[in-house]
Image (spheres, rainbow, N blue to C red):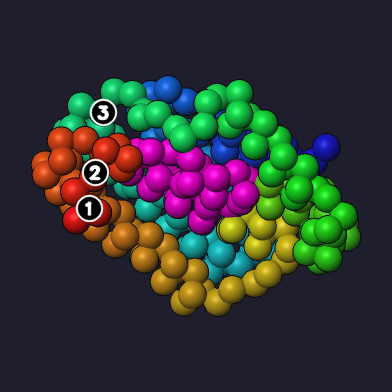
Amino acid sequence: MTFVESLLILFFISTIFFHLAKKNIGVAYAYSFQSLLIVILLFNSFLETKSISLFFVAFLVFVIKVIITPIFIVKLIKKHQLKFLVSTYTSMPVTLVVVTILAIIANSSFLVPLTSIIPSNQQSLSLALSSLFISLFLIINRKGALSQIIGVLSLENSIVAFAFFAGLEQTLALQIGIIFDIFVWMIIATFFISMIYKHFGTLNVSEMQHLKD
């Protein structure tokens, strides 16, 4: 097992951890750790290619995703005293079953055309695709707005991981634009969540019945 493959396995485990975590603060730190793994992947690629633009992107990802975004999340948790995650639509056993099924689907022959873009990285691509599916399920399954935001951020990290192992190159301008969008989106989400909590007194989306009126 190579160093890069080990990083991807840790990335996959962190995605599953989002479904198991009971405390919001743990999820915030887990996202920071997950993003740090992406930074290490990018930096490792920089050491191999000596691309200054890749180093710049890795630095931006570190600042925005590893430091600033978790700070925003932690401030939200402390401001609204969100000590624990809200419930899920499915029980924990069912959640784990669904996560397992999604991982099996990602490794199925049905998706081989997608995961075999680079044959030597097929297993890594399958793992990255599993993380993508599991992150998407987090968005659907969690009732808390904060948890859903983490799901979106994890989904974006999974896409980056998949693109990395698929050898999909992006321009520096596009990469910076994506990171900037995440930063702005996080600021907007912070204010949006504060408004929701102020109006409804909860971030549990299933209890916001007034939104149906």
How many marks are shown on the rendered structure?
3
Mark linked to residue 112: none
Mark linked to residue 208: 2
Residue 118: give x, y in percent of width and height. 83, 63
Q: Main secondary structure of the magenta part?
A: helix
Q: Is residue 125 shown left or right of residue 80?
A: right
Mark linked to residue 211: 1
Q: CA distance from mark 1 to mark 3?
A: 22 Å
Quadrant the C terminus occupies: bottom left
Quadrant the N terminus occupies: top right
139 falls in the magenta region: yes
Question: Which image quadrant is residue 113 in?
Answer: bottom right
Q: Is residue 174 shown left or right of residue 114?
A: left
Q: CA distance from mark 1 to mark 2?
A: 6 Å
Determine which residue is flagged by label 3: 82
Magenta region, residue range: 131-158
In the rendered structure, which disc, 1 or 3, sits on the residue that comes first in sequence? 3
Residue type beneath disc 3: Leu
Q: Is residue 166 shown left or right of residue 134?
A: right
Residue type beneath disc 1: Leu
209 falls in the magenta region: no
Q: Secondary structure at mark 2?
A: loop
Question: Which image quadrant is residue 171 in?
Answer: bottom right
The crowding category of the residue bearing disc 1, from other C-alpha atoms within 10 Å (few below 14, some 14 to 19, many at least 20), is few
* Residue depicted at 42% across the width and 58% down the height: 60
